[in-house]
Image (cartoon, helix red, strand yellow):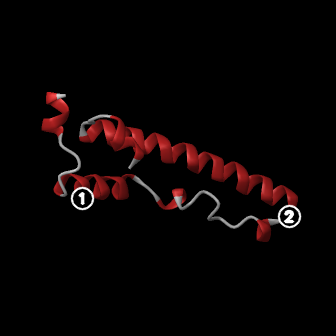
Amino acid sequence: MDLLAGREYSKSELAQKLEQRFERRRARMAKRAAQARVDRALETYPLVLDGGAALVGPEMIAAVLDRLESDGLLSDARFAEA
């Protein structure tokens, strides 16, 4: 929701920003998992360290954007006017 606080975004622009944000988190998670395997300490590094980013994909982002749009929190028309 912090992305919505700054200014109006188009739906496609917000989808792109969210994809980038979660891609970085997935990359960090992969790096952590690789290090854990090297250290043989997987049990001390649960796969939820990234706050669930591994579960977030394009379909989930699209569903959330649709929900924001239906709740009136996201509007391409408002974005175009801004």
Q: Are marks 2 and 1 in contact (CB under 8 Å)?
A: no
Q: Amino acid at mark 2?
A: Arg
Q: Residue furthest front?
A: 5
Vertical placement of residue 19 versus 40, above or below: above
Circle 1: is it few (<14), some (14-19), or many (20+) Cα within 10 Å?
few
Please report the residue visible at 20 percent of the width from the left and 33 percent of the height from the top.
79
Kindly report which numbered mark, 2 or 1, lies closer to the viewer in this rendering.
1
Q: Is residue 59 above or below residue 7?
A: below
Pointer 1: what residue?
Answer: 67
Percent across and percent down for residue 18 are: 41, 44
Q: Is residue 72 left or right of residue 19?
A: left
For marks 2 and 1, give the CA distance.
42 Å
Label 1 element class: helix
Q: In the image, is 35 to the left or to the right of 1?
A: right
Q: Amino acid at mark 1?
A: Arg
* Image-based side of 79 in relation to 55, left or right: left
Q: Quadrant of the C terminus?
A: top left
Residue 38 at x, y = what percent? 84, 56
Of 22 and 72, nearer the camera is: 72
All told, the count of numbered labels is 2
Label ID, residue 54: none
The extreme bottom residue here reads: 43
SS class of the residue under badge 2? loop
Residue at point 49%, 48% (across, down):
22
Q: Quadrant of residue 70?
A: bottom left
Q: Position of residue 19 (x, y in %)?
A: 43, 44
Which residue position holds label 2?
A: 40
Q: Earlier in the sequence, mark 2 or mark 1?
A: 2
Please give the name of the residue rendered at 12% of the width and 37% of the height, measured from the top-left corner. 77
